[in-house]
Amino acid sequence: MVKKPTPDSTRRSERSRRAIYGAALALVAEVGYAKTTIEGIAARAGVGKQTIYRWWPSKADVLLEAFLDLGEQAAEQAAQQAAGLGVQPAAEYALPDTGDLAADLKYVLRATVDELLDPTFEAPARALAAEGVVNEPLGRQFVAKLLEPQLQLYVRRLRAAQDAGQVRAGVDPRIALELFVSPLAQRWLQHTAPISYEYTDTLVDYALYGLVPR
Amino acid sequence: MVKKPTPDSTRRSERSRRAIYGAALALVAEVGYAKTTIEGIAARAGVGKQTIYRWWPSKADVLLEAFLDLGEQAAEQAAQQAAGLGVQPAAEYALPDTGDLAADLKYVLRATVDELLDPTFEAPARALAAEGVVNEPLGRQFVAKLLEPQLQLYVRRLRAAQDAGQVRAGVDPRIALELFVSPLAQRWLQHTAPISYEYTDTLVDYALYGLVPR
């Protein structure tokens, strides 16, 4: 089957969209959320501000989509890397499930460490996280659309482990995931201590096997 | 023994200091860290800005001390409440040690929930935390002087539990404490989900006894 050629107008829109995402992420990283404006994003992307208003109602919406796009690109890259290393790539929107819960969680958290230390992601993510701390509606919007969907992947993986008898029956997966996800988030957000693969591996071991002697 | 009377000049300084702390915390809560200035703090506290510069080299230092003072006041209040409830009050700068690690951690985390939901503390704490996310030197300063000393209290309590054979010998207490402290911090900072006593009690149980069946 011959692939239908993409019309020129769609290709132009796609280029504009990419330029707008890039401009929005760069600006928020440089000047912070409060000083980022639709006008500034338009000027930097080389488009008219009406082009932006036609597609997005507010700067929060532009940034949200720019971030979702960044996440999708990272996921694609990770899948390609995993394939290159002979690792079973995760099905779209699911954590790996090899049957070994500890190994799967360690694998995903190591990838998260890489992402948090990637400058492309780090500067805009920090600017938005900082704004979300003091701007509750924005914080809640980003949680609902960006963070919580990611956390729900852990919920599903932990439920599968629970069904397999590898996690205690009474455990609430939505709270349980925080034992290894939140420490990494706090170290990164608040600069409380360095992050590394060894650190996230340790978190998984402590969370799964507990601190008191078995 | 008769208490030596406080000289008038010291009492005046003490009053100014309280006024400056209060003004600094109120301002940072209202306009954020970036827009808080020594001039603004001085005007609101009703003192000359030279009075502030005489005692503190920068606004970060004023805010840091204002916060330390707020923490000390909260600790005194908690000790009085604990005494009123017949609970053994914690020795200064130590977590309670009744020999029951789970109960002691739950007690302290419940007090932290109260503090995080107290509006006196919440607004300035959010403003500073938000700035620390994007301003690494400030973040590190606040961690070193405010947050890490509190975390070290958990390190000591966990070491005592380790000495008593109640925590596995190989566990690093500095990482272990993050399993129950960081989830609470992230929910509060990022508005990811509500916080409550039931929630922090659950975190302690999961962290101590692990997620996999025993």
Image (cartoon, coloured by chain):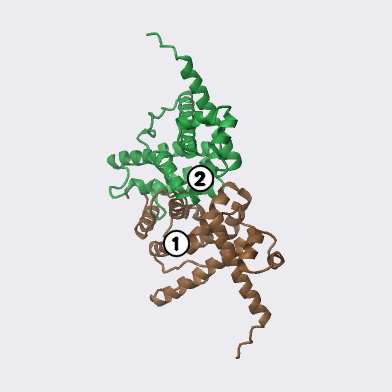
Chain colours: A brown, B green
Side of B119 where A116 appears, left or right? left
Side of A12 where A188 appears, left or right? left
Looking at the picture, does residue B6 appear above or below residue B114? above
Write down the chain letter for disc 1: A
Circle 1 sits on which residue?
A112
Q: Residue furthest top?
A: B2
Side of A92 where B153 appears, left or right? left
Circle 2 sits on which residue?
B129
Q: Residue furthest front?
A: B50
**Residue type, label 1:** Thr
Disc 2 crowd rating (10 Å Cα; few below 14, some 14-19, many 20+) is many
Picture disc at residue A74? none
Q: Is residue B90 visible?
A: yes
Name the secondary structure under disc 1.
Answer: helix
- Work out which quarter of the rendered image holds the N terminus of chain A and state it: bottom right
Side of A165 where B41 appears, left or right? right
Looking at the picture, does residue A192 appear above or below residue B36? below
Write down the chain letter for disc 2: B
Where on the picture, by quarter, is residue B100?
top left
Looking at the picture, does residue B197 appear above or below residue A4? above
Q: Position of residue A203 (x, y in %)?
A: 38, 54
Q: Nearer the viewer, residue A2 or A99?
A: A2
How much space separates mark 2 and mark 1, taking CA atoms? 22 Å
- Residue at the spot 33% in from the left edge and 39% down from the top edge: B156
- Residue at the spot 57% in from the left edge and 29% down from the top edge: B45
**Residue type, label 2:** Ala
Q: Position of residue A125 (x, y in %)?
A: 52, 58
Name the secondary structure under disc 2.
Answer: helix
Q: Nearer the viewer, residue A60 or A136?
A: A60
Q: Nearer the viewer, residue A164 or B34?
A: B34
Where on the picture, by quarter, is residue B163?
top left
Q: Position of residue B46 (x, y in %)?
A: 58, 27
